[in-house]
Image (cartoon, rainbow, N blue to C red):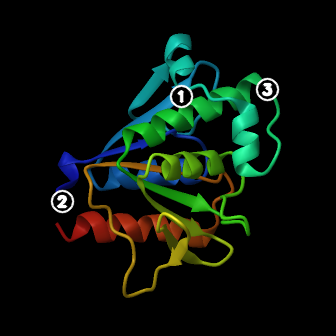
Amino acid sequence: MKSSDSILFSGGAHGAEAAFGACAERHGVEEVNFTFDGHKIARERGVRMLNHEELLAGDVSLEYVSRLMHRRYTESPTLRRVLQVLWYQVNSGQEIYVVGTIQDDDTVRGGTGWGAEFAKLCNKSLHVFDQDKDCWYRWTGSSWHALTASDPPIITHAHCTGTGTRTLRENGQAAIDALFVRSFDAA
């Protein structure tokens, strides 16, 4: 696939999202970073400021998310907006790439976990790089499948989403870098 035909949807936040954005820029991939007024982000390229009405389109019941994720989410307005922004990121991409940690209940830790769960609900291609296990995983529809060095993920759709933890480790950064090299340097 040609990088000039591709778009990365993200949120531009510090950590994994900023790393996805920097890779997109280096490889000539267009970047759209959804955010909201007052939210501090690390990326300035492709910023798409969502207004109040647009954020409401991505609204979800925090009670529902809490039940689905097996943990309690607070009623903070900022958290609600972050979850709404994740809705836009996942809704826009056809392939979803997440950096984080897969928990024993098959959810991904943190706010990013909602993005992964929403991707599952939408039946989107979902890959998670688990920093603790130092491995890429693919969601099969019912469980996580560990990918091997001979079968790593590659971006195959022009519209992809990159999101993840704000606590990006060296192995997470290396996984993002390698994903973009595999996906766009061979083209």
Towards the viewer: 78 or 31: 78
* Residue 4, placed above or below residue 132: above
Answer above or below: position of 87 versus 135: above
Looking at numbered disc 1 in the image, what kind of residue is underneath it?
Answer: Thr
Name the side, left or right, on which 98 lies relative to 101.
left
Identify the residue shown where x is 37% and y is 44%: 93
Which residue appears at 79% of the width and 38% of the height?
A: 73
Three-letter code for the amino acid on which mark 3 is drawn: Ser
Q: Nearer the viewer, residue 98 or 107?
A: 107
Residue 106 picture quarter: bottom right
Q: Tell us which disc is closer to us: 1 or 3.
A: 3
Q: Secondary structure at mark 2?
A: loop
Q: Which residue is mark 1?
A: 35
Mark 3 and mark 2 lie on one chain; the one further toward the N terminus is: 2
Q: Residues within 10 Å of mark 2 (few under 14, many from 20)?
A: some
Is 78 displayed left or right of 145 in the figure?
right
Element type at mark 1: strand
- Which residue in the structure is indicated by mark 3? 76
Would you say residue 63 is visible in this rendering? yes
What residue did someone put label 2 on?
Answer: 1
Q: CA distance from mark 3 to mark 2?
A: 41 Å
What secondary structure is found at the residue carrying circle 3? loop
